[in-house]
Amino acid sequence: MWTKIVPVTALIASVSLTGGTAYAEPATPVGGEALGSRGLVAPEGVKKPPKTKATSYVVADAGTGQVLAAKDAHGRYLPASTLKTLTALTLIPKLDKNRKIRPSQNACNQEGSAVGLTPKTTYKVEDLFRALMMSSGNDAAMALAETNGGLAKTMADMNAEAKRLQANDTVAKTPSGLDKPGQSSSAYDLALIARAGLANPDFTHYISTKVANFPAPKGKHYQISNHNKLLWRYNGMVGVKNGWTSKAQASFVGAATRGGHTIVVSIMRHEGGFWDEVASLMDWGFSVRGKAAPVGQLVDPLPAGLPAPQQQASAPATKVTPAQQPPLLDTAARNQDDSTKTVGSVVIGGGLLFGLIYLWYGIRRKRARSRF
């Protein structure tokens, strides 16, 4: 079997758009060399993955960590509410789920999707996690961050957790996933975070709950439901998280279990209406699992106290077929205001090209003068 990828030349250094400083790129992307492609990476010898309108996606076996197919796996995009997976994974071990809190007015006033928190009601931390992962409550995300010691501390904790997981494409700026300059994640990282979350029983409980009673003022309750439509539609669906903002477009990471095996699918930057496409990718993952050579690997978390490595072992790839390479930057990437974008390298290349043109033009003028 061989792996079909779009070849991407490794950049040795790039120039920051803000500071002008150079930095070294890792020699091999996390999870294997093939995952550095911005095009489709799929095994030969089995049927191709079904088509999707997602700009980026990953299909992986959660048990083995094998990446079965991917497209632009490490492309950095705005994550929208899929970032709440990192919020939950970070804060579940830190907060007592039976602790009772009253949310601040700031938390209750968060924009976007909300569960309807009010300072007049007392909530358990586990209520807030349900609101976070079922109803995608931005108010619950802020309330949890404040319970953890404040927004700044929670952002530091979330980014430290991302580094521990080797989710190096992920930069958290908000606990809710609301768009903010510099915030990013990737389909690879979402799959990595979801896989880690599935190992936590509380995380799995929150993402798989379809409906739950939620506290209301004066001792009353109202019912909330999970926004993940595949919990009702797809056989074996465990859950995880979907997200959407106008800048990020639709994103999703989900997991399903059949026959003792779990498949994870993550997508980013989809125009919307992705549920059937995700189901098809899930079906494909189950059908080829154990039959195809993996194109990469979901790496394990780092042991406590160790820094992130600069290079990972390459995934198996015995044959490379060129294909059309998409543009290096897209609208979502530009909106992130990421100062480490590789367009600095493009600027350098453009300067060299301009110099060659200028030199050629000077030689032509000198020859022209010599004729007279």
Image (cartoon, rainbow, N blue to C red):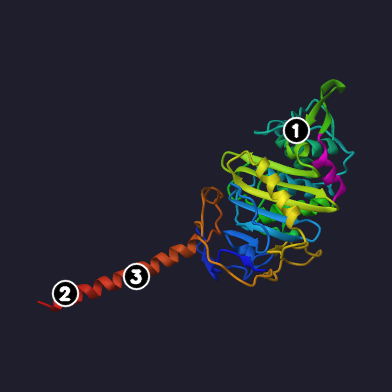
Give me the residue at 64% from left, 72% from top.
318
Q: Main secondary structure of the magenta part?
A: helix
Q: Does residue 300 appear left or right of residue 310 in this picture?
A: right
Q: Is mark 1 on a helix, strand or loop?
A: loop
Residue drawn where x is 85% and y is 20% of the image? 218
Q: Residues under labels 3 and 2: Cα distance?
A: 20 Å
Nearer the camera: disc 2 or disc 1: 2
**Mark with earlier residue (2, 1):** 1
Q: Give the residue pinned by disc 1.
A: 104
Q: Mark 2 points at which residue?
A: 368
**Residue toward you, 125 or 84:** 84
Q: Residues within 10 Å of mark 1 (few under 14, many from 20)?
A: some
Label 3 sits on what residue type?
A: Gly
| Residue extending furthest toward the bottom | 370
Residue 165 placement: quadrant: bottom right
Is 208 included in the stretch rendered in magenta? yes
Indicate the amino acid at tag 1: Ser
For mark 3, give the secondary structure.
helix
Q: Can I make out residue 228 in this image? A: no
Location of mark 3 (residue): 355
How packed is label 2: few (under 14 Cα within 10 Å), some, or many (20 or more)? few
Magenta segment range? 200-210
Question: How many badges with numbers are in the image?
Answer: 3
User: Mark 2 and mark 3 in contact (Cβ < 8 Å)?
Assistant: no
- Residue 85 among magenta residues: no
Examine the image and state in which quarter residue 205 appears: top right
